[in-house]
Image (cartoon, grey):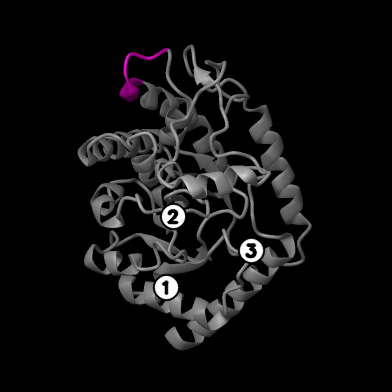
């Protein structure tokens, strides 16, 4: 974002991740391992935020299209990620706008150009919004739950305005609690978020449902059904461990998600998050990534045979 949007300079100081700060021995273990820190300092907003340079995005989209055209088979669909205004505003602190709401809305207005360009290029837009869950134990760690839920409502409203010209069935919303191997004991339950997330103008929700802290979330979806026209991209592979899931485990997870949604045609199998969400931070060896993706494909075949 610092290269595409105006208004950023200097450094921000992100508040610590609550579950890392709460366990000193775990924090020491994390700090002893040489990798990019989750506490890295991005720039801060020191001026008006506007989208000023489409060149990097256009070059990346062209490179992606070139890579796709070299494949022997066509994908059913392709997707491209872009950040939510909330994660930009949470990570890149505000020294310019009168309020957090003003800042979030300004970022959303700037990101509108990127959102529209991605869909115009023929891709599904995936808005990556870890802020809609993770900031509960980061930016809002010392504040009441209600304050965080008001932030979720603010961000969802801003996203909706930014998507005014984008068909909702070409957008999916990725919400997560932070893609790092940690205790996650302060994660906000999906139960508290579901109704507010369902206000988004999107056609699918991407959720972490494989890691040990959120493998039960299919039960929440059964109690709080997805909007009728939404799909679910269910995370059935953990992206923070070198354990390779057995295909039968993957199939069981897909079937649990399909049962919760009520229609297997509305469920896609995915990974919990990216294997290297912060560049250089990944913990899964490259060969193991491919083993996990093979397990994902095989588990999907098994589940499809059972469900259909």
Q: Nearer the viewer, mark 2 or mark 1?
A: 2
Q: Residue at x 40, y 34 (%)?
A: 86
- Judge from the rendering whether residue 232 lies leftward or rightward of residue 10; answer left or right: left
Q: In this view of the protein, which residue sits in the foreground, 151 or 115?
A: 151
Lower sequence index among marks 2 and 3: 3
Residue 265, can we see it? yes
Q: How many marks?
A: 3
Within the magenta stretch, is there residue 142? Answer: no
Residue with the mark numbered 2? 183
Residue with the mark numbered 1? 265
Residue with the mark numbered 3? 75
Which image quarter is the C terminus in?
bottom left
**What percent of the width, then of the height, locates residue 272?**
50, 60
Q: Residue at x 43, y 84 (%)?
A: 307
**What percent of the width, then of the height, locates residue 15?**
43, 31
**What percent of the width, then of the height, locates residue 241?**
58, 63
Q: In this view of the protein, which residue sits in the foreground, 126 or 298?
A: 298
């Amino acid at each position: 974002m610092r290269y595409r949007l105006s208004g950023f300079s200097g450094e921000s100081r992100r508040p610590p991740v609550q579950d890392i700060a709460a366990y000193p021995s775990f924090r020491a273990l994390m700090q002893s391992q040489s990798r990019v820190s989750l506490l890295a300092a991005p720039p801060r907003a020191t001026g008006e935020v506007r989208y000023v340079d489409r060149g990097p995005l256009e070059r990346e989209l062209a490179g992606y299209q070139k890579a796709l055209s070299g494949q022997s088979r066509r994908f059913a669909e392709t997707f491209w990620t872009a950040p939510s205004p909330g994660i930009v505003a949470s990570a890149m602190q505000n020294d310019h706008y009168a309020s957090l709401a003003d800042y979030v809305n300004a970022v959303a207005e700037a990101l509108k150009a990127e959102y529209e360009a991605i869909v115009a290029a023929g891709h599904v837009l995936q808005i990556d919004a870890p802020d809609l869950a993770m900031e509960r134990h980061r930016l809002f760690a010392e504040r009441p739950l209600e304050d965080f839920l008001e932030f979720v409502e603010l961000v969802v409203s801003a996203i909706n305005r930014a998507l005014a010209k984008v068909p909702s069935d070409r957008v999916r919303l990725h919400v997560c609690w932070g893609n790092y191997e940690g205790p996650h004991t302060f994660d906000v339950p999906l139960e508290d978020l579901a109704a507010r997330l369902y206000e988004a103008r999107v056609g699918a929700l991407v959720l972490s449902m494989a890691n040990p802290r959120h493998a039960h979330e299919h039960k929440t979806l059964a109690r709080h059904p997805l909007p009728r026209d939404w799909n679910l991209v269910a995370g059935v592979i953990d992206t923070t461990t070198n354990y390779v899931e057995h295909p039968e485990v993957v199939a069981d997870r897909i079937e649990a998600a399909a049962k919760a949604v009520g229609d297997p045609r509305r469920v896609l199998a995915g990974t919990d998050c990216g294997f290297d969400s912060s560049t250089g931070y990944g913990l899964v060896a490259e060969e193991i990534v491919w083993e996990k993706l093979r397990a994902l494909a095989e588990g999907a075949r098994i589940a499809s045979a059972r469900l259909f």
